Image (cartoon, rainbow, N blue to C red):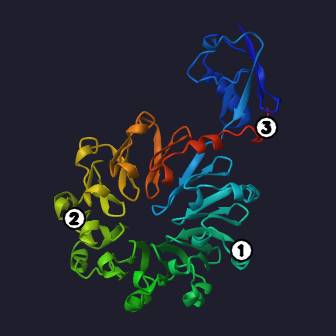
Amino acid sequence: MPSISVVCSHGRAVAGPLHVEPEQSIRYVKQIVLKQLGCPCKLLMDTGLELAGRATLQQFDLKDGAILTAVATKMVMKVVASQLGKAFAAIATDGSVLTWGHPADGGNSVEVQGQLAAAAGVKSVCGTGSAFAAVGHDGSVITWGDPRYGGACSALVQDQLAGGGGVTSLFSTAGAFAALRRDGTVITWGAPGSGGDATAVQEDLAAGGVVSICGNRTAFAALKQDGKVISWGLPNFGGDATAVQEELAAGGVKSLCATGAAFVAVKVDGSIVTWGMPSCGGDSSAVRDQIAAAGGVVSVCGSGAAFAAVLQDGSVLTWGRPDCGGDSTSVQEQLSSGCVKSVSATSAAFAALLRDGSVTSWGRPEFGGDSRPVRDQLAAGVISLCGTGAAFAGLKLDGTIVTWGRPDSGGDSTAVRAQLAAGVVSLVGTNGAFAAIRRDGSVVAWGRPDSGGDNASLQDQLVDSSWPVAAG
């Protein structure tokens, strides 16, 4: 019975000597090391060859007294992206942030890694179309990406972010961030025309009481504790809610949703208030009576220019630009069945997940509105949906993925089919790529490389021999 030992990359002993049978798997040894390190690792021979988990010790011809090196690897817990963006940000098990995608739009975070490390770990990340902002466990906010669109903030804003009890959550438009502080006040930065300048409503925001914020491409809407709403940003795109101010001032709003250029407020009684570009969902007068007849709205989803509302009776009602999903007559039979569970969107199409695990879609065919090519795969077993700007991905109960829509935006996943054959637990999309988190903490990406579809750089970030390892 051979004896082997395992040391960390710094030479300190991790496990051993271990007396193991030649037929024992490498995975067995890794489990022992995992208990000692408290994190997953790669096992390397002195030649640098990695020992695969399913292989046996005998297959690698390990001799008695052999020494293996354990290289700690990080596991991804969560991946974050904006459907308007071109990069992904992943939060690892140690609280660090790993990024990939378009370098100038947040895919390169090298310059702020020191700040991220000093933040005692990151608890949340949010993205605009061209930048990211992270909230550290110490309450600090770190930004990177295009400085014009939220990737940098002034010293004054940094001081403001540090006050108010610290930042609890971040929200975004295409080019600006809004930070909600613990005292219910809001701080903004980024492109002024995208909601980065909240001077017009500063008095209202400084009064506190904000509980959540919603952003479209160029405006924000904030929901207050009393059920009232404040909006700012590009006036015609929802930044000016004067036309519906009386309805919003009455309170009773429980949630907000947006298209690219309009907002909808859902009230506790199931009624809705809409404003912004009329053609993009800001005018809901044509569907008000139908909403009331169905008992009100339960939830709403927005594409780039249309809304889809799940009603109290389980049916779906749409309005806004017809070619962006506002016209759902082609699938009205499925949507009026009373069995719709949830709705997801790309920039110009919707997909509805029914209670039986099947999926139906509508809108622009090339943006995911036509799912007929994968109809059989979507007939049952789907548990969640995710969209990029022009493609959908459906996660099935068995951990597999089904994709459709524009091939170069993630609709074609044949290149990574083997990696998506099982074990996927969640999905997230940028404007042109998907990222799937697998059960083992690994990440699979596909779609446009300049939008995060190539995550080769992530693999290097996940294996870090300088990462501190505590030997048992």
- Relative to 241, does residue 349 appear above or below in the rendering? above
The residues tagged by marks 3 and 2 sit, at their Cα atoms, a distance apart of 57 Å
Comparing labels 1 and 3, the label whose residue is closer to the camera:
1
Query: Quick check: 124 above or below 42?
Result: below
Q: Secondary structure at mark 3?
A: loop
Residue 469 lies, in percent from the top left, at 77, 38
Mark 3 and mark 2 in contact? Answer it, CB < 8 Å: no
Q: Residues within 10 Å of mark 3 (few under 14, many from 20)?
A: few
Find residue 381 and report its image quarter: top left
Which mark is in front, 3 or 2? Answer: 2
**Residue at position x 79%, y 37% in the image:** 470
- Residue type (three-letter) at the residue carrying disc 1: Gln
* Circle 2 residues within 10 Å: few <14, some 14–19, many ≥20: many
Measured as percent of width and height from the top left, residue 254 is found at 43, 75
Q: Is residue 320 toward the left or the right of residue 212 in the image? A: left
The quarter of the displayed image where residue 462 is located: top right
Disc with the residue nearer the chain's start (1 vs 3): 1
Q: Amino acid at mark 3?
A: Ala
Give the residue displayed 53% in from the left and 70% down from the top: 172
Asked if residue 81 lies left or right of residue 65, the reply is left
Q: First in sequence, mark 1 or 2: give its number.
A: 1
Residue in the picture at 60% in, 74% down: 180
Tag shown at residue 328: 2
**Which x, y percent locates residue 311?**
28, 68
Q: Earlier in the sequence, mark 3 or mark 2?
A: 2
Q: Residue furthest top?
A: 1
Q: Quadrant of residue 1?
A: top right
Amino acid residing under circle 2: Ser
